[in-house]
Amino acid sequence: MQKYNPQKIEKKWQKKWYGSTVFKAQDKSKKKKFYLMVEFPFPSGVGLHVGHCRPYIGLDIITRKRRMEGQNVLFPMGWDAFGLPAENYAIKMGIHPSVSVKKNIANYKKQMKNLGLSFDWSREVNTTDPGYYKWTQWIFLQLFKKGLAHKEALTINWCPKDKIGLANEEVIAGKCERCGTPVEKRDKVQWVIKITKYADRLIKDLGKVDYQQRIKDQQINWIGRSEGAEIEFLLDFKKDPKLNENRGPKGERAAIKVFTTRPDTLFGATYLVLAPEHPWVTLATDQNHDVLSNKKEVADYAKSIKNKPEIERTAEGKEKTGVEIQGVVAINPATGKEIPMYVADYVLAQYGTGAVMAVPAHDERDYEFAKKYNLPIEEVLVPNIIDKRNPPVVGKQFVERKNVHAIVKDPKTGKYLALKWRKFDWTTFPMGGMEEGESAVDAAMREVKEETGFTNLKLVRVLPGQVRAEYFAAHKDQNRISYTTAVVFELVDHTQVDIDQKEKDGHDIIWLDESKLNYENMTHAEVEQWKQKISAKIPAYQGDGVLINSGEFTGMDSVEAKSKIIRLVGAKPTITYKLRDWVFSRQHYWGEPIPMIHCKDCGWQPVPEKDLPVTLPNVKKYQPTDTGESPLAVMEKWVNVKCPKCKGPAKRETDTMPNWAGSNWYFLRYVDPKNSKKLADEKKLKYWMPIDWYNGGMEHTTLHLLYSRFIYKFLWDIGAVPKSLGNEPYKKRTSHGIILAEGGVKMSKSLGNVVNPDDVSKQYGADTMRVYEMFMGPFEQMIPWDSKGVVGARRFLEKIYTLAHPPSHKASAGRSQKEFTKKEDANIAGLLNKTIKKVSEDIEAMKFNTAISSLMILVNAFYEASGNITKENLKTLLVLVSPFAPHLPEELWQEVGGKGLCSQQAWPKYNKKLIKEEAILLIVQINGKVRDKLEVTAGMDQKELEKMVLASPKIKQLVGASGVKKIISVPNKLINIVL
RNA sequence: GCCCAGGUGGUGGAAUGGUAUACACGCAACACUUAAAAUGUUGUGAGUUUCGGCUCAUGCGGGUUCGACUCCCGCCCUGGGCACCA
């Protein structure tokens, strides 16, 4: 008796496939092209783990199916091999990174082949290959030539132990990724690429592509576009008024520019805040200036903040600090009032202009700061409510008035005092108009006393801000605009005085639960606002509404007021992004050299294109130097060159590129990997691009995915890729979920819980490994590995093997052969066709788990019908299974005498007619509950069906004497009887 | 705090308005076996039962509907991303 021996089968077919051209994509073909890509890995010393395999297997399934459907599929693989781990290994072991990388690549490739992944290995690329990075450098030169790359002084992360600059992604929880030393800040001149110039297009063009929504959301979020305005605040030098006479080159007075998204609140700007790094602060505190009366204090504060490590400065819940800048004030351009200036740590230097106008009444952070330093808070905006239950009546005049609401809580019951009006079906708080000169508290107490008689009240607080409301006051037959203040009280006791008979007749006194304080129960919609304010931690109102205390803009809608106030003060509408420009310098050895030469006389000069690539020289030591420069800096022979312009002595740039540089454009290289004249041949680009489907990890959404979209757009702009292609590289982007270790924790080397695909393959076979990974759960979902669950996949494959070897199957114990009727044969045919449909659709939707489950159902049905499985049916099954588990079907295909390779068969088509079932299990419900199931013929007449259902004894009994009210019929599925 | 995804048996999950718990793991009993493994058969949400059923269950509370895991409103919890972005 033969046994399923995956190891033997798999080796055999892998040899056959990889020794042939079955996976090769054709650059010329009449077939439809399909370019499918998974992210290429960094080949680390540890090798692939099962998590890496998930996207590879998933997209391999799609690739194999599309090939069987007759498409010309490009499914390439390569290596993103520059990067820190290879360099760290070199430092530790003294082995050149190119040597360890080569070894790792060989291992990765072997692992991938062991899984039967159908990559086209003839197009393999490697970012560390000079023939490849020649073009990475070429792209940099183009960026430089177009003014998108320049050197800039920046504050970077600095590891004092390793003496090296770190990228943000190399800093983990404020510590150096390599040695764990807390990171410091240091100013360094770095190459920067202006990705922000493309920010708008990177958002807008998301409309053209089919990415999962979560990916689009995250990119939009990351770019963080906000519309607002830059407003100038003139300065008034109090300590040295002469300076007010000093004019700038165009005759302008000294001013501070702020960025704000809320110019509508300008009238409420009561002070100005500068970031500690703001250039004006630096200037005003340097040796040459003496404009502040507390210069030392300001200078010391700014310095202390700048020296603070990033983690400390941005720690959650940290209290804001700041110092007033004395001797100078700013002038609010809307009110003309003098306002104080502060330097404070809560303003970010990198965003906007590094300075903000503080509106404490309407901004949480400003409120917090103003409270701490006792700064004026001026309300200029109120929420506005148009009462939907008592809307203003068209044509009637509006009367403005000031109102109070008294919110009285009985602490014993937790309930709130309210009035139920008899005449109007209203429920309100005790309320009324405020009289001339009366305070809100007095007015509220008066109203409570007049309307309810309660006198013993304890003031809790006056709620901040007013609410504006427009409504029709039926009892006075007038439209009203009310500005209402709310006062919160606690009821001390139930002492009550007699109230006016008119009031008594007007309403009943009721007590409402807190949950009833809403628009459903209460008449005036502003109760919702009050409720929010009662529980609000910070009383700054941040929404839109209507302006108050804003001069000529008072009463105007805040959205409208934005543009009008911008115009009033001559401000500039501005768009700001959270996205920063891309720091492109690294002080590492193992990266692409930046192809620039610095000449004392000519400045930065690009390396002539004919001299590319600038190859990475061999060094003896990979450690960075004491000056924090890359190890290349000490290679004098390499560094010292002639200036390309004046031929005088000059030096090469010794910084290298970040590890994102090579992955920016690798998809273009797959199209034409060996071209030495161009990035890639234009014809080939036109044929293959854009990528039809790109799958990768969510962790690359905001870096790699964004960077590569940007670089592609740039290449498109300069015509390096054909204009006819459109300016988005990826038509469709999907993401897989990561695989967790058993117990739901992260799989990591340090925790020792990494599952190696080689071990799984060794124990169960690669086919089992593939099927299990796809069957575990939804592809895009994070999921824990379950070593017990793997056997389910193996059993599934065993059953298929057994189907093709019926003698051993018949011999198995306890199993009886069934006699099959025609009807059961028809069922098998129906099931087979349904499965073809489901598997075909599920693969495209990446619902691999349900595709496999439907294959399991089919196999179970075949298994039960073992004697009756025709060779044709078995062959169809093999073809359906082969994208998921390609090796076993290949073997069995040969055994049953199939022609050619199973993986080269045509993908089966289903027969619609066979899917339709003749006999249907009709569900009978009574009042929506399942009460009976009847077997009926498909397409029966509805009336007849209803008759039949009502005649069934069970239903007859349940319906009884109640009488049928209504019958709802879903054809061929269900009948619901409503009693 | 903001944005996104999710919450269903002992476990991974299926069902996106129409039989909740497909498929698989695990578990239990039985068969085969000297025995074990493997394989097969049967059972497996909870409660109740006169073994016909009945009742309850998809994070919690409401709503829409003949009918809701699915749609709407409010809340709780978990995961991911961003985070003093003015």
Image (tube, grey):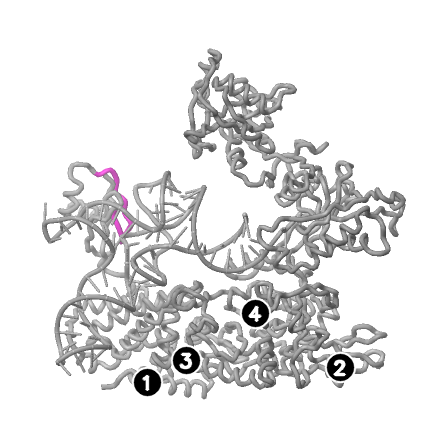
Q: Which numbered tag is attached to residue A639?
A: 2
- Closer to the chain start, of discs 1 and 2, is 2
Give the residue at x 85% y 44%.
A239
> Is residue A689 visible in the rendered structure shown here?
yes
Q: CA distance from mark 4 to mark 3?
A: 34 Å
Q: Amino acid at mark 1?
A: Gln
Q: Amino acid at mark 4?
A: Pro
Q: Quadrant of the N terminus of chain A?
A: bottom left
Q: Residues within 10 Å of mark 4 (few under 14, many from 20)?
A: many
**Mark 1 lies on residue:** A894
Q: Amino acid at mark 2?
A: Val
Q: CA distance from mark 1 to mark 2?
A: 62 Å
Q: Is residue A419 above or below residue A282?
A: above
Give the residue at x 54% y 36%.
A533
Q: CA distance from mark 4 to mark 1?
A: 38 Å
SS type, badge 1? helix
